[in-house]
Amino acid sequence: MRKIALLGMTAAVLVSLGLYATAAKEKTLTGEIVDTTCYLAKGSKGAEHKACAETCIKGGAPVGLLATDGKLYLLIAGGEADVGKKAMEAAKGLAAETVTAKGTIVKRSGMNAFAVTDVAKKAK
């Protein structure tokens, strides 16, 4: 009985502190695929930076999504392993393009990431 009461009290404390896991809600973001190295170091983006961004991403630079609201998100694979991997590969092939991405926002230690499950070039 004590164990049950202790578990119940622990759960109540965690809930009140907001330290419990919640299911993240899927979101859709629109923005430009950027290589985070050049973007963070020099603000490089756009069509004039496309060739460099492609080279940097192929060389291993982290891929980012510069959302239309000005926030930069580090792209990480989301969802099931195959789904997230396909979405990341798609993103890597769309440097300097405007895309629509689906996934969940992840914030940790002051950093914004987007666990991406789908990425597609935005129709004009």
Image (cartoon, rainbow, N blue to C red):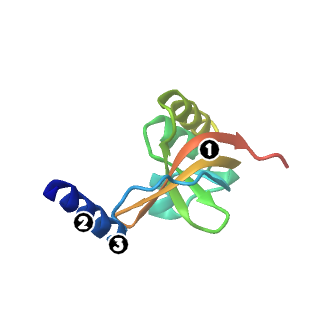
- Under mark 1, the amino acid is Ala
The picture quadrant where one finds residue 2 is bottom left
Task: Quote the CA–CA distance across marks 2 and 3.
Answer: 11 Å
Residue projecting furthest to the top: 82
Residue 58 in percent (x, y) is at 50, 35
Residue projecting furthest to the front: 1
Task: Quote the CA–CA distance across marks 3 and 1.
Answer: 43 Å
- Under mark 2, the amino acid is Met
| Residue 96 in view of the camera | no
Question: Which disc is residue 25 wearing?
Answer: none
- Under mark 3, the amino acid is Ser
Task: Quote the CA–CA distance across marks 1 and 2.
Answer: 50 Å
Residue 79 in percent (x, y) is at 51, 38
Question: Which disc is residue 16 wearing?
Answer: 3
Residue 35 in percent (x, y) is at 52, 49
Marked residue nearer the N-terminal end (2 or 3)? 2
Q: Crowding at label 2, few (<14), some or many (≥20) Cα neighbours within 10 Å?
A: few
Camera-side residue: 12 or 116?
12
- In the rendered image, the vertical position of residue 116 relative to residue 67, given as above or below: above
Q: Crowding at label 3, few (<14), some or many (≥20) Cα neighbours within 10 Å?
A: few
Camera-side residue: 111 or 62?
111
- In the rendered image, the vertical position of residue 99 relative to residue 12, given as above or below: above
- Residue picked out by circle 2: 9
- Residue picked out by circle 1: 95
Q: What element does badge 2 sit on?
A: helix
Q: What element does badge 3 sit on?
A: helix
Marked residue nearer the N-terminal end (3 or 1)? 3
